[in-house]
Image (cartoon, grey):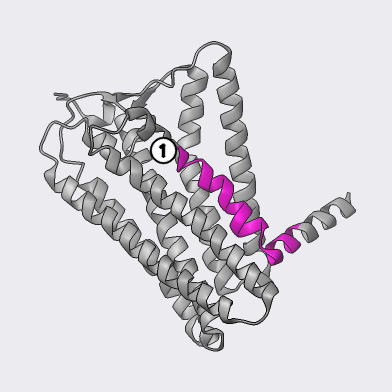
Amino acid sequence: MYNGSVVSLVLTLHSLELSGPSIYSAFIFGLLAYLIILLCNLTIAFTICFNRSLHKPMYILLLNMPINDTMGATSLFPQLLYSIWCENRLISYSACFLQGFFVHLYGGASHVILTAMAYDRYIAICSPLRYGAIMTNNNLLRIITGMWFLHFIMIFVTFLLLLPYKICRTYVDDLICYNPSIMKIVCEDTRVNNIYGLIILSFYHIVSFSVVAFTYIHILITCISKKQSDAKMKAIQTCGTHLVVFLFLEFNTFFPLIAHRSENVPAYLRRVFSISVLVFPPIVNPLIYGFKTKEIRQKIFTCLRRKIGSV
């Protein structure tokens, strides 16, 4: 048992098992991935912020996604790149705790943002005449502040429950810090944390999956009933792409958390999935939800032409 202050406690994350030339290759690959994530997500965020024509409910809800993806990638890459470059897997307990908090804040926010966006598209396509009356500025503000406030409180309580525990071990059997990996290094009974964690996990996945399934099924039914074949195919392709992204996120966030509760799941699989959820969605989301959207793409190209023309 560690009897000193946890603030000064230093932990050791699981080894990346890199050596020789692979260290530099991994560092360059990681740095490029992080820069691409920042470039794509910040481009989408600034495009929405600085174009008044995009200040509509659909795009305001979408704005939450690049902000959240930037937060998620930043909770991983700076610490990971530092550990690769310095060949050092040490991390202070306070930094580990903070990383875990932001990893969970990102993961849960991804679910609530996609859920809110699915509801917005459901109203726009299935009840277009009522869209303006339902998605008013006040209601939009309530949706955004409500989802972030509720989500923040749930994650805050999750990590607040960790504070009283004493630390038994300094080795973290994961590539990053998050709630289950931190719970494995404490000495005391974490039954309350496990029960609360399972309740929160069930809440996020059941509610988000139910809302997304309900909205997209109704969207598909509405689109299929339309006579315009072009509009029908476009809607089906869009819904299909969004559903694939959502299901990927569902599995990627669900699997590592459940894997910690089972001894039958290989540890390397758990580590891979815990990292991939912080890498692939922040890269894919700007392409699918941002650059693929005609209005956003046009604004970006217009801005680029102005910049090139002024040179």
Image quadrant where one finds the N terminus: top left
Asked whether, in this view, residue 85 is left or right of residue 107, the answer is: right
Q: Secondary structure at mark 1?
A: helix
Asked whether, in this view, residue 54 is left or right of residue 144, the answer is: right
Q: Position of residue 46 (x, y in %)?
A: 64, 57
Provide the residue span drawn in magenta.
276-300
Q: Kindly identify the residue that appears in the image at 23 percent across and 50 percent down.
A: 197
Q: Kindly identify the residue that appears in the image at 15 percent across and 32 percent down.
A: 166
Label 1, on which residue?
A: 273
In depth, the one of 202 and 147 nearer the eye is: 202
Seen as rendered, the residue at the extreme left is 189
Circle 1 packing at 10 Å, graded few (<14), some (14-19), many (20+), is some
Location of residue 122 with respect to 5 vertically, above or below: below
Location of residue 51 with respect to 11 vertically, above or below: below
Q: Position of residue 55 (x, y in %)?
A: 61, 71
Q: Kindly identify the residue that appears in the image at 61 percent across and 56 percent down.
A: 288
Q: Position of residue 56 (x, y in %)?
A: 59, 74
Q: Position of residue 205 (x, y in %)?
A: 33, 57
* Quadrant housing residue 172: top left
Location of residue 86 with respect to 105 vertically, above or below: above
